Image: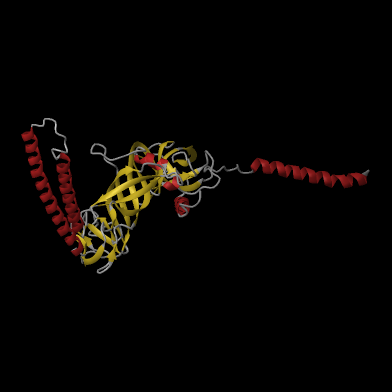
Amino acid sequence: MKRIIAVLLPVIVLVVLVGLGFALTSVFKPPVERADEQPRGLSVFAEVAEQTDLDLKVRAQGEVKPKRQIVVAPQIAGRISYVSPDFLDGGFIRQGQVLVRLEAADYELAITRARSGVASAEQALARERAEAELAQQDIEDLGIEEASPLARREPQLAEAQANLESAKAQLADAQLALNRTAITAPFSGRVRERSADLGQFVSPGQALGTIFATDVVEVSLPLSDEELGRTGLPLAFSETADNPGPRVVFSTNVAGQRREWVGRVKRTSAALNPQTRLINAIAELEDPYGAGADDGVPMAPGLFVDAEIDGRQIEDVVRIPRAALRGVDQVYVGDGPNGKLEIRTVDVVYSTDDGAFLASGVEDGELAIVSPIQAAFDGMSIQVVERMPDGSLVPRTPRTSSSDEEEEDTADAQVAGETDGAVQ
């Protein structure tokens, strides 16, 4: 018995001492300190949404073509005896200027023969008139009341008159052929190419060259149905004084420098292109080599130009940075005072590199987040830093951290901002 007590007594004492130690520790341990600061959210850049009016633009491309261009060709045959020094590739020509002249000797002889025929016909008509008068006198002397037209020589007189008219027509035809030996320019313009030269024999309709007018050039701009709606043009449009077409700014690089010209849409094509399902808006520029030129540089035919067409104006839309648009129709909005993120579905009216314009979903003055955020969700904790137009940063979420932690947050926002434009 004494042996059992000797073994159990140290164990009981040890248990009592351990229990007493735990009790004393619980009584005298310091209270648990709780952190007052909540976990900090992701620092993000945001820019303010602003209400504005939107002037829609439609961009297209096309080739510059002259409004009038013809192939110069003779109406008669002959050998070329003269070529204007201006009738060469790139030459400037004036309306009525003789470009090519054919040898006229054969046609001058034809006029001489035609004049002789007119004289003979006139003499025959005079003789027939005299004989008709004599026949009429004989009929009256004989007292014949119902003489036949042949007895009165009416058919013979009509034949002589017709012969005279025919001779005069031959003379006019010969004179016309002589006039056609001089091939003149029907308008002022430039020579695109020349394909005949001095001494060459040409046939009627043979091409001598190509010329185009420089008063107006035009560009066919293919537009989709949506783009046509943005311009406000009807499907069958033709400009009038009361309904002018929209303004168009043409631009392209010429000799390494960007050039611009201002024209107008004059009409739309008669039908849609069956292959592309697009319709052409035909824009014109007047006097491209004069008043319409850009600092003396003309919008010459053959140039391939970019065109920006003025479209409709939409009032009271909200503009946000293009980087704030996520996917097709979502925007992350930052609640600065509460440090929360909201995911909004928006109605996008128009989007360009300069910004996205919304009809609804974001209000004027709200902060649209432009920093990329992965796995975003409604109510996500964030630290909003507004990026001002001058590039300065203004924190919009209240902070309880030390100044060192604030500087660290701003640095986080700057790092996030450097990835703007990344795939959202």
> Is residue 315 rendered to the left or right of residue 102?
right
Residue at the farthest front position: 142
Relative image position of residue 276 (x, y in whole percent): 45, 46
Residue at the farthest top position: 145
Placement of the N terminus among the 4 image quadrants: top right
Measuring 10% from the left and 50% from the top, which residue is drawn there? 123
In front of the other: 260 or 338: 260
Relative image position of residue 105 (x, y in whole percent): 18, 64
In front of the other: 161 or 86: 161
Query: How is the rendered protein coloured?
Result: secondary structure
> Is residue 48 rendered to the left or right of residue 139?
right
Please identify the quarter of the rendering in which residue 197 is found.
bottom left
Relative image position of residue 271 (x, y in whole percent): 39, 41
Task: Using the rendered image of the protein, determine whether residue 301 is visible from the camera's viewpoint.
Answer: yes
In front of the other: 118 or 267: 118
Q: Is residue 67 above or below residue 158?
A: below
> Is residue 137 rendered to the left or right of residue 260?
left
Measuring 15% from the left and 48% from the top, which residue is drawn there? 164
Please identify the quarter of the rendering in which residue 398 is found.
top left
Q: Is residue 110 above or below residue 38?
A: below
Measuring 46% from the left and 46% from the top, which residue is drawn there? 275
In front of the other: 89 or 289: 89
Relative image position of residue 205 (x, y in whole percent): 30, 57
Task: Using the rendered image of the protein, determine whether residue 391 is visible from the camera's viewpoint.
Answer: no
> Is residue 369 rendered to the left or right of residue 188?
right
Question: How many numbered marks appear?
Answer: 0
